[in-house]
Amino acid sequence: SLVIAENLDDGGPLKRMKINEEGDSKPVADDIIMQEGGGMSLAIPKKEIGEIRERTDHRDKLRESLIKTCRDGQKAAKQAIFALHRGDAARAAKLLNDVENCVTNDLLPILKEEPNMRH
């Protein structure tokens, strides 16, 4: 038998499929989720959903880190330009060195791990 667990926002009801129908002491499989909607039923293993969620969470963290690091690098580059306009070449050189280190040490490793974030 199928037991309705909850409703999904974008699909039909979420259902759990029982593997053991005999009523004996064998465990009931809670590792498969059935989703019905649009005339189709899809069996989605919980383990795969968990792995997808972990990959997505990791990618989101990388993306947030990339965005913050880019902003920090842009800010330092902007400050270097202002320093040059004021005639402070030493400060501009230090800031540009910081930008280079930011790109080399912080941004490129993220892009190497997740090349699709480069756009």
Image (spheres, grey):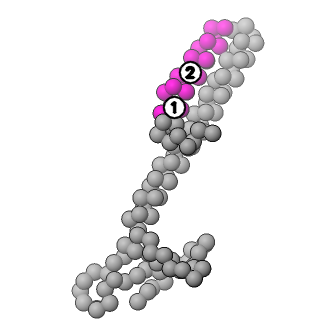
Residue 91, percent across and down? 63, 12
Residue 103 appears in the rendering: yes
Query: Based on the displayed image, in which of its 4 quarters is residue 84 positioned?
Result: top right
Asked which secondary structure carries label 2, the reply is helix
Which range of residues does the magenta coloring cover?
89-109
Side (left or right) of 84 relative to 11: right
**Residue 32 - label:** none
Given residues 41 and 110, the one toward you in this image is: 41
Q: Nearer the viewer, mark 2 or mark 1?
A: 1
Residue 10 on the magenta span = no
Side (left or right) of 118 relative to 58: right
Side (left or right) of 101 relative to 33: right
The residue beneath circle 2 is 100
**Residue 108 - label:** 1
Compared with residue 113, is residue 95 higher up or lower down, i.e. above or below?
A: above
Residue 98 on the magenta span = yes
Magenta span dominant secondary structure: helix
Location of the C terminus (image quadrant): top right
Residue 69, percent across and down? 57, 33
Tell me which label, 2 or 1, sits earlier in the chain: 2
